[in-house]
Image (cartoon, rainbow, N blue to C red):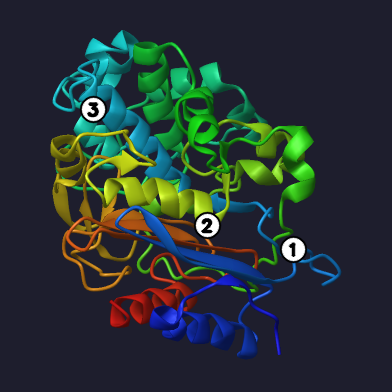
Amino acid sequence: MTDIAGFAPPRFAGVKDAFAANFAAGEELGARFALVEAGEVVVDLWAGHADRQATKAFDDKTLACVFSTTKALAALLMARLVDAGRLDYAQTTASIWPEFAANGKASITVEQLLSHQGGLCGFPERMDPAEWFDWELICAKLAAMAPLWPPGTASGYHPITIGYLAGEIFRRVDGRSMAVALSEDLAQPFGLDLWIGLPDAEAHRVADLQRPKGLPDFGERNAATVAAFLTPWSAPAAADPSAWRRMPVPSANGYATANGLARLMGALANDGWLDGEQILSPALIAEAARERIRGTDLVLPFEMSWGAGFMRNEAVHPWGPGNQSFGHSGWGGSCAFADPERKLAGAYVMNRQSTALLGDARAKRLIEAAYASI
């Protein structure tokens, strides 16, 4: 039996049971799940081990790499710029980043880019994986690149490149990187254990990853899928894991606790209020989550509904029954979501990765148990 730490009141006993069952079934190494209702943390559970040798506890200070769940943080940071009147989702990317207009990209809007419609999901031509560590070089390559499909006609998930695209827009408008803005504006003021790129001083808190034995099922592979995921140079972490951990790439390199993610998403489920302060207006929350495109994704093997950087729950329902829920999932199983209809938000992190691209079964059990409890 695995000892479960944290808390879940009797009302949410089913969530604790589901959490324990994931461990009893041998599906977890270490994990944490947190649930926020109307701005209050109502469930926070953790258990297991932070190392593959099972000698170090996965505790309330353990950080997990959340991969693409980081994109929810990026979407929120972009939304705050729009809310402040410093950015418009409908303006062209080239109006902020003139070099981006090359090769037929002059009319691509910020919201099209954020909803994975820009056709820049990866680099089809051979490159040195070490190039990913040069922010300016990658941004220059993306600005010069020709789209892999006509922009605005379909979505095609951008696993890594969207972090450079959104991050460069943010940097040109705000003057800071998303990593610095997250730290200065949200993480430090509200005590949220959230990072985009992780300094060496915090590395001792990161849980070891136990990677899956197989590959995800990408369905029918096309040029976009190959460029996004399946070239030898599409996985920058393999080139230098320690250097990649430090890289502030807001698409795939977030480190977080479930508590920190759930509290931040809890603000999006609660009219923007976080600890008595409004970090985003209700109107902008709705606008950020509004559907920009829906249809068969050119990279992921799903019908996807995209907001302005947020995955929308309505098409695939990885996060319970709420049609208005939104958030993001990450490679291996992590996720964070907000349900404004029920003022509910949650986050799941772990270090034993599955092959699920979306809707990891362990997280789904926890989220379904949470909805059964309210």
**How far from the left and from the top, in percent, is residue 258?**
52, 57
How many angstroms separate mark 3 from mark 2 (CA)?
A: 29 Å
First in residue order: circle 1 vs circle 2: 1
The residue under the point 39% across, 28% down is 165
Task: Provide the residue designation for mark 1.
Answer: 50
Mark toward the viewer: 1 or 2? 2
Task: Provide the residue designation for mark 3.
Answer: 110
**How far from the left and from the top, in percent, is residue 134?**
60, 22
The reply to whether callout 1 and callout 3 are in contact (CB within 8 Å) is no
The reply to whether callout 1 and callout 2 are in contact (CB within 8 Å) is no
Q: Is residue 67 visible?
A: no
Residue 258: assigned label: 2
Mark toward the viewer: 1 or 3? 1
Type of amino acid at the residue the image marks with label 3 = Val
Quarter of the figure with the N terminus? bottom right
Type of amino acid at the residue the image marks with label 2 = Ala
Quarter of the figure with the C terminus? bottom left
User: Quick one: SS at disc 3?
Assistant: helix
First in residue order: circle 1 vs circle 3: 1
Type of amino acid at the residue the image marks with label 1 = Ala
Along the horizontal axis of the image, is 248 left or right of 114? right
How many angstroms separate mark 1 from mark 2 (CA)?
A: 14 Å
- Residue 108: image quadrant is top left
Please tell me which residue lies in front, 363 or 260: 260
Residue 35: assigned label: none
